[in-house]
Image: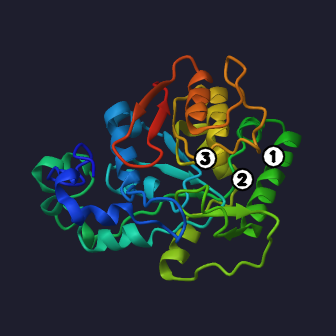
Amino acid sequence: PSLQAGLCAFSHNEDARGSAATNLDKKRYGGRRNYIRNQHKNSVLRIFLMQTYGIEYLNQQDGVIIDAAGGKGELAWELINLSGVKDCVVVDPRQLNLSLVQTKWKKGLFEKKRTGPVFSKWYPACEDGCKMRQSKSPRHLRCFLDGEACVEFMTATSKEDVHRADEWYQNQLIRAKEISWTSKGLTQHEDGTSYNEEEATNNVETKSSEAIETAESEISSAQEARNVLQKSHLIVGLHCDQAAGEIVDFASAKNIPWCVVPCCTYSEMFSCRKLADGTRVTSYDHLVQWLQERDPRAKVATLDMEGKNKVVYTLP
């Protein structure tokens, strides 16, 4: 675990643990890949954002942080409830699932008496007894992030363009709910999920109280969705798969900083991606370099977690 992220107060010498460390080599899902210890990846990236951009910028007045391909919505939830960010909106076609972080919240695991005086600085929105108040679910644009289409939707002004853009958004909401999410692609995704648009759908979604709460946070109004995109001042993506390039496209069009922790390469799907020297993007290192080459201001850092831990980002 990351000491900087305040995930553990003690350092560990893995070499000295001997047989106690054998579980670190266990395979996951019965496959060939080693188990990856990145269960705290949302916290690690959240604290990187706090260190890199500062809480004042993250909490910009009337600003919105976009969590693109945010999956369950845990990163956005942490930014709002642990860091105190006013508004962070998830853009992802999947239904949010905040049951794990909400359970931790109700148990008081984020309170200062649990995090301690050294690490509580990374939890500025938490205080002793905060478990007694309700945590806030992030708002949710339940659609795929298409950089060019989102810019057109956001910038529509004439009555005709607005009508066409609003119709596009409503179709995106329908498309998202018709996607059948499967367990295929386990050898490609670190979180064990993938989508198969051909396996459509009469999906029966979870109807728990947590699911009902997150469903209520979904943005159905096209005007509200447009306002979210217009007010965005930072867009981030953690293991965002196919959305990595779209994040950069959207940020570049809007001239806002972006922060991407890339994961899968999808070299066959994006066969046109090439580095500056003409090399096709076919590996993880190529993908990191390709993202960096998209913007001359882009920087690269390494996050303190296992797995795909390179972060490519730009500053305001």
Q: Earlier in the sequence, mark 1 or mark 2?
A: 1
Answer whether labels 1 and 3 touch (C-beta < 8 Å).
no
The image quadrant that residue 184 belongs to is: bottom right
Query: For numbered disc 3, what is the local secondary structure?
Result: loop
Question: Which residue is the site of mark 1?
Answer: 165
Q: CA distance from mark 1 to mark 3?
A: 30 Å
Residue 64 x %, y % = 51, 43
Answer whether labels 3 and 2 touch (C-beta < 8 Å).
no
Answer whether labels 1 and 2 touch (C-beta < 8 Å).
yes
Judge by depth and name the residue closer to the eye, 103 or 170.
103
Question: Which residue is the site of mark 3?
Answer: 264
Q: Amino acid at mark 3?
A: Cys
How dense is the environment of label 1, judged by Cα within 10 Å: few (below 14), some, or many (20 and up)?
Answer: many
Query: For numbered disc 2, what is the local secondary structure?
Result: helix
Question: Which residue is the site of mark 2?
Answer: 222
Q: Earlier in the sequence, mark 1 or mark 3?
A: 1
Q: Earlier in the sequence, mark 3 or mark 2?
A: 2
